[in-house]
Every structure is written in C-alpha cells, then in structure tokens.
Amino acid sequence: MATCSPYPTHVHRHTHWWQRAWVRYGALITLLALSGLVILALVREQTGTQGFLVGLGLAVLPVPLLIAAFRWLDRVDPGPWRNLLFCFAWGACAAALIAIVANSFATRWIATATADPASADTLGATVIAPVVEESAKAAAVLLVFLFRRRDFTGIVDGVVVAGVTATGFAFTENILYLGTAFGTDQLTGDSGIASVTAATFFVRVVMSPFAHPLFTVLTGIGFGIAALSTGRHRLRRALLPLAGLLLAMGMHALWNGSAAFGEYGFFAVYAAFMVPSFGLLTWLVIWTRQRELGTVRAELPAYVMAGWLTPAEPYALGSMRARRIARQYARRHAGKEGARAVARYEACATSVAFLRRRGRRGRAGADFTVRERALLDALWHLRDLARPALEHAARATAPPPVPVPVPPWAYPYGGTHGAYGTHGAYGLRAASGPHAPQVPYATQAPHYPYVPPYQPYAPPGPHRP
C-alpha cells in the first residue's frame, strides 16, 4: 500500500560556500573544460592539425552507435542525461589526460632506469597503461556512485555509466592513434587500403570499438552489485568494485599484450577471449534488464490496490514492447506532448517500483515516504494522457484468451461438445442441469490483466490527492 504521509518541514541550515551546489558544479565544469583544452593541445601537438582533423572525423563514427546501445540498455529506468554527459566528458578529457601524462612519465622512467626503450614500451603497454587507464575511468563511476546514488541502483546503471565513460576515453585515444597513423602515411606516401590509417581504422573502429567499454564495464558491474548490497555488508560493498577494477585491468593487459603472442596473437585473443566475453556480458546485461521488468510487474500491483494505477498498467509497464506501443499511440493521438507524457509516466512508475523494492529490502533511506509521494504525484498529474495509451498497449500485447475445454460427457443429450462453456466455440448449446460439471470462474477468465474500456484522450484535469 502506498504511503501518503505529508511532506516534512524543511529546516533551513547555514551552509558554507563550498557546500553549495553551484560551487561544486562550477568547479567540476571548470576542471573538465581545462582538461579538455590541455588534451586538445597535446593531441594536436602529436598529430598535427591535419592529422587531428582526420583522426577526429574517423574517431567520431562509432560514438553515436555505442551511446545508443548503452542508452537502449537503460530504457527500463533511464538515468538523467547529465550523468551520461559527465561520464563521457570525464572519459574524453580528464581520464585521457591522466592516462597520457602518467603513461608517458612511467614509460620514460622505465626506459631511463633499464636503458632499454623497447622493453619499456612493452612493459608500459601491458602493465602501466591498463592500471592507469582503468583507474582513471573508474574514478567517474565512483563519483556517480557516491554523489548520484539515487540514479545508481543496480548492475545496468553501473554498466551504462562505465560504458559511456569508456566510450569517451576511446574517442580521444582513437583521435590520437588515427591522427598519428595519418601523419605516418603523409611521410611514407602510403594511401588507400594499404595505408597505416586504414589498418588502424579497421582494428580500432571496425573490429574493436567495444574494447574499452568492455574493460570498464567490469568495474561498473562491481559497483552495480555493490549498489544492490545492503548496508550491513560493508566489506562486500568495498571489495566488489575493487574486484571489478582488477578484472578490468587484467582483461586490458591481455588485450594490449596480445601482440607479444606471435604474428596471429591479436586475432587469437580477439576470437578466443574478447568476442566470447563481449557476448557473455551482453547476455548478462539483457538478463538483468528482464529482471528489472519483472520487478516492475511484481511491485506495481500494490499501487493498483491503493488506487494509484489501473489494473492494466503493471502489465503494460513491465513490457518494453507495450511501452513502445503506448508512446506511439500517444504520439498519434496527442502529438509529441502526449508521447513525452507517456515516457515520463513510464519512468516515474518504474522508479516507484524500484523504490518500493529497495524499501522492502531496507535500502530505501529515511526519505522513502517523501520520494514515493513525489513520484506518485507526478503519476497522478500525467494520468489523463498516459493511461489511455497504456491501456491500449495492454490490449494490443495481451495474449489471447485460453479456451476452457469441456469433456464430452458434459453433453448427455448428444451433439458435438463445445469448448468455451455457455454456447461453445461454434454456437452449440452447452450442457445444463444438475449433473453438468461446474467449472470454477477463475478457470474461465482470460489469462491476461483486466483492461478497462477505451477512454478517449481528455485534457489534464485538476489535481486530486
């Protein structure tokens, strides 16, 4: 049953200037902007202006596809765009700057200490780079986990945050590698398929655009499992992210060191390790998303009993196909405003379901009642536009009624027996009398949620508690 206690009285407390939100946001934006300017200057210095532009044009190609893929994974309970923008900017600017500076310093120090530049490059690529780069990318996941805890509730959120961060990092790294390859081709005069630029583009953009996201996703899964752990499991919450980070470093080191396994070492590692790992993690994330839909279907009926939702809505909100049909229906009948209202309604209802699940497990926090009431109020304001669309989607996606078979002995007067009770499937008279079997009502009911009659769209009415 939904709780509807009043909002608590807000106590105004004195806060220091560094605790104000605009100060923190301003400092973060300034840090990312300065990191972007520095990384831009460093990459342009190493590739030249023309190489930088070529690398930028080629490196941007996989970015929309990767962002769209991670956004698709997050469709059940989508997080705010500001989190994704921060993660991408951190990966492309701050993490890339940390990696370039730290990797260059470590490689030069090893080369000076061992007087063997070739071994220093190999050691830097297989040992130093995985540790530095994965730690720099994990910092963004940690920041979202600590300061945007409400938006970080499970494995899918960890995968999305980590994947978008790694996408930004790979974007900057690809600019550097592709721009350097183009500069090499300019010196040697190579062009076309035989050029270094084409080979680099094929390996980094065509074959392995998911490499960096795959590594960092392991860290995100560790944070996601930690988010699902209860407060009394503090040691587990600390060790799981660390374990994910160590796995990400190990996989990254194996990938970077594949060239040391011989002429076909890269392709062997790619086929035997990277592709199966990518498939396994993809399956894990999709399976987790289906569990989230199951949570929506399991938790929302409590709000149906309380009168906040209609009986059809838990079924429709627990199906991605029904959600899509509802948005399309709203767009046809109420335009973009209706589609946005339905999308907002779906997001609020999903958040309510996840909040209730965390509350039952003791992880919702002291402000559970306030957050629940705020979400329910948002649903109530949007109900006039969203409910007809969701009811239409429930009718469109509900399975057909299951017929109730009637045995032949139920017809003592002869004739062909029917299959649907009262008049049969083909209009034949069903059995009657004191000896006719009595089929329970529950078995006669269709096996899909009750859907109220169609109600046309109407403008939103006044708010009713």
Image (cartoon, rainbow, N blue to C red):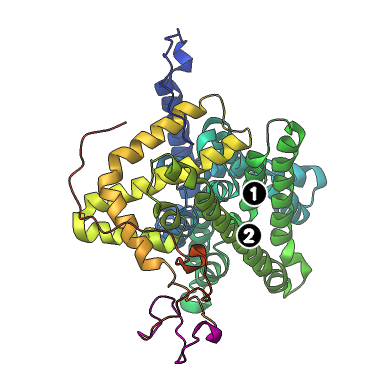
Q: Residue at x 47, y 10 (%)?
A: 16
Q: Which residue is mark 1?
A: 221
Magenta: main secondary structure equals loop
| Left or right: 8 in relation to 331 | right
- Residue 408 among magenta residues: yes
Magenta segment: 407-427
Query: Toward the viewer: 275 or 258?
Result: 275
Residue sitting farthest toward the bottom? 415
Residue sitting farthest toward the right? 114
Q: Residue at x 54, y 36 (%)?
A: 144
Classed neighbour count for the residue bearing mark 2: other residues with Cα under 10 Å, few (<14), some (14–19), many (≥20):
some
Query: Toward the viewer: 102 or 64?
Result: 64
> Residue 325, can we see it?
no
The image's mark for residue 316 is none
Seen in the picture, residue 13 relative to 24 is either above or below; the reply is above
**Image position, residue 80 (x, y; %):** 42, 42
Query: Toward the viewer: 434 or 143?
Result: 434
For badge 2, the amino acid type reads Leu
Q: Are marks 1 and 2 in contact (CB under 8 Å)?
A: yes
Q: Which residue is mark 2?
A: 284
Q: Residue at x 62, y 42 (%)?
A: 138
Seen in the picture, residue 429 relative to 442 is either above or below; the reply is below
What is the C-alpha distance between the residues marked 1 and 2?
A: 10 Å
- Residue 461 among magenta residues: no
Q: Quadrant of residue 358?
A: top right
Quadrant position of the C terminus in the picture? top left
Seen in the picture, residue 280 relative to 370 is either above or below; the reply is below
For badge 1, the amino acid type reads Ile
